[in-house]
Amino acid sequence: MSGKNVTEVALADAQAIARAARILEQGGLVAIPTETVYGLAARADSAEAVARIYAAKGRPSFNPLIVHVRGAQQAQMFARFPTYAQHLAQTQWPGPLTMVLPRRDGADLAEAVTAGLATVALRSPAHPVMRAVLEAVPFPLAAPSANRSGFISPTRAAHVTTSLDGRIDMVLDDGGACEAGIESTILAIREDNSWEELRAGPLDPQSLDLDFQRHVRASDGSSDGSPGTITAPGQLASHYAPGKPVRLNAREVAQDEFMIGFAGFAGDCNLSLAGDLDEAAAQLYHCLHLAAASPKPKISVAPIPAEGIGRAINDRLRRAAAPVT
Ligand code: AMP
Ligand code: MG
């Protein structure tokens, strides 16, 4: 299916969603909007289909992929849920939270999805188009962001075609921009209910702290130790790279720079002149795409406070600014 060089871009109505489901069933690749960014989906139970994701993205094969499911019930087929993970699934799904959990023996997932780890990353997204596709197929979907590996993530259908046109079968276009605009928060949860944030995202774990304390006290009084460090392979220093130098915390703009503005610092593209961090997250990749396409050879970005979703914005900006090795 994939490998052909025409990519169908279709408005995500019921017919297009049914066509997407058929393509996925046959092992093809479909870019699907979620509330975070566009995902490049393939059936997670097929080694061939998953291999096509790696090929289309040019992704190093040691990076594990997030498995997207309808909800907790489907997720239980692939992972064991410590009580805290059950609690988070109940309170945060569907939504921009990915949980890395102990993989179940015999889970029907292609090896490349978990890259040989004993854990699996699971998420139940909230976007109605992604949910409709998940309802239309019996298998879960492996879906990294729908862009060439290392480049800027897509929050609009046009961003997907910029980087993957001709390399995938279909793009489901929701006609707008992804609401959160930044990749999901990833929390690893251990069997003893202790947890670790592997990637900052739209859901601030600080907002979960009180819940967590209450929950653990109310349950089995789990150990307070933190056995075993969990690593997140693929969290590379250089990522989201616009292909030109990026200068952060810029309070003035040089003539050869495309300025990305925020709050009191206006630029060529503004994350949020009102200083709203949610709006800034939603605009981040769009501004980076415009900056990449601009004739200006350099990019500068105004200071962004590192609070709430601002932590995730600064994380992505640091990687966008890191030298490509
Ligand atoms: P994305 O590029 O948005 O698909 O995010 C995938 C990222 O999720 C990977 O690069 C890892 O950092 C993380 N991840 C996925 N699966 C696992 C896992 N089993 N253990 C730890 N991190 C994971
Ligand atoms: Mg990505």
Image (cartoon, rainbow, N blue to C red):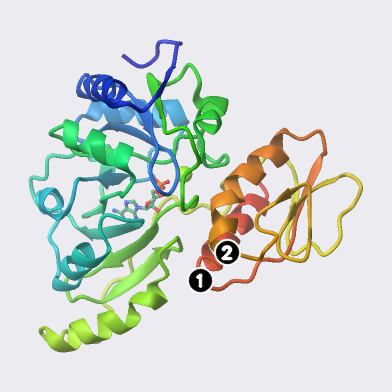
Query: In which quadrant will I find the N terminus?
Result: top left
Give me the residue at 25% from left, 22% from top. Answer: 27
Q: Quadrant of residue 99?
A: bottom left
Give me the residue at 45% from left, 20% from top. Answer: 167
Are the two marked residues, 2 and 1, in contact with CB atoms closer than 8 angstroms? Answer: yes
**Residue 157: image tag:** none
Residue for badge 2: 277
Is 59 placed above or below 232 here? above
**Residue 308: image tag:** 1
Considering depth in this image, is 26 or 37 the residue closer to the camera?
A: 37
Is 69 placed above or below 280 here? above
Disc 2 on helix, strand or loop?
A: helix
Question: Within 10 angstroms of label 2, few (less than 14), some, or many (20 or more) residues?
Answer: many
Considering depth in this image, is 79 or 213 the residue closer to the camera?
A: 213
Residue 226: percent from the left, percent from the top? 28, 79
Front tag of 2 and 1: 2
Q: Report whether residue 243 is seen.
A: no
Disc 1 on helix, strand or loop?
A: loop
Count of marks, rendered view? 2
- Disc 1 residue: CB within 8 Å of ligand 1: no
